Image (spheres, helix red, strand yellow):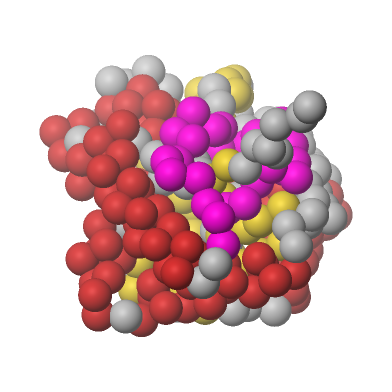
Amino acid sequence: MTGAPIVTASLPMYNLPEMRSANAAFWAALRGLLIADGIAAPEALAFERKPVPDAIGPEVLFSQTCGYPLETIFRGAAIRLGTPCYDAPGCEGATHRGIFVVPIASPARVLADLKGGRFLLNSRHSNSGMNLPRRALAELAGGRPFFAEVVETGNQPGNLDRIARGEADATAVDCVTYAFWSRYRPEAASRTRVLCPTPPSPAIPFVTSIQTPPETVAALRRALHRLARDERFAETRAGLLIADIVDLPDEPYRALLDYEREAERLGYGILA
């Protein structure tokens, strides 16, 4: 005999340890709506899931995945369920930005001042950590490496911790990540500053596996829309800075590949 298939739910994009209760409350509210709609759902979030996982497999009932890998390494593996609108600096509607962050004492005043420095990168597959800053740097780089060293770490909040300690010259992170990190680690945040933003991007969507049955996909979308608008969940939304959850067409996410192509045309296909 075989057991029931594994089904998982996760919120890995904004997942500081200090945020576990807020993320758990969001999932508890969403799960309750799903169960009321006749959809079985796991009791708890999988907090260990990486922001850029190895794959989006059939077990993924609910998660949140960066838009750039959805158009590249995960293309065809997931269905977008809705895009959050965040109440955070750098967000407008269903968009967000990457931001370049430097130590508070950094002499850098404009992006060009980072040339020859040490840069912390969370992932080569990241939109806010790589794709958007690559486009911002492409015209400055002139087809040559811009930094003296690029260190890939796998973790945006960890990169901010390191910038606060003065261990590198700059990093680029999602502006929502910076908002949460600043909220929960204000002393460290006081030792950093935002140098400049990247170009804008659609915010990070909620997703499910491409193999999720259509009726379950429809129920997930209904539950998200109710969670986004029902006053019973106002405190739950506020805990994750969510002002709304909306449906976006494919085009804004496909446009993230335009940033990639523009950087390549400028001779800066690899952030270096």
> In this view, which residue lies farthest toward the front?
1
115 sits left or right of 146 in the view? left
Residue at x 56% of width, y 62% of height: 39
Task: List x then y, in percent, for residue 55.
Answer: 74, 37
Residue at x 62% of width, y 42% of height: 7
67 sits left or right of 194 in the view? right
Q: Is residue 33 magenta?
A: no
Q: Is residue 52 magenta?
A: yes
Q: Quadrant of the N terminus?
A: top right
Residue at x 65% of width, y 46% of height: 60
Q: Is residue 12 above or below residue 49?
A: below
Task: Write the start and end of the magenta stretch as one range.
Answer: 39-62
Query: Image quarter for residue 205?
Result: bottom right
Task: List x then y, in percent, for residue 184.
Answer: 20, 40
What secondary structure predominates along the stretch shown in magenta?
A: loop
Q: Is residue 270 visible?
A: yes
Q: Nearer the viewer, residue 227 or 68?
A: 227
Q: Is residue 225 above or below residue 43?
A: below
Q: Nearer the viewer, residue 229 or 205?
A: 229
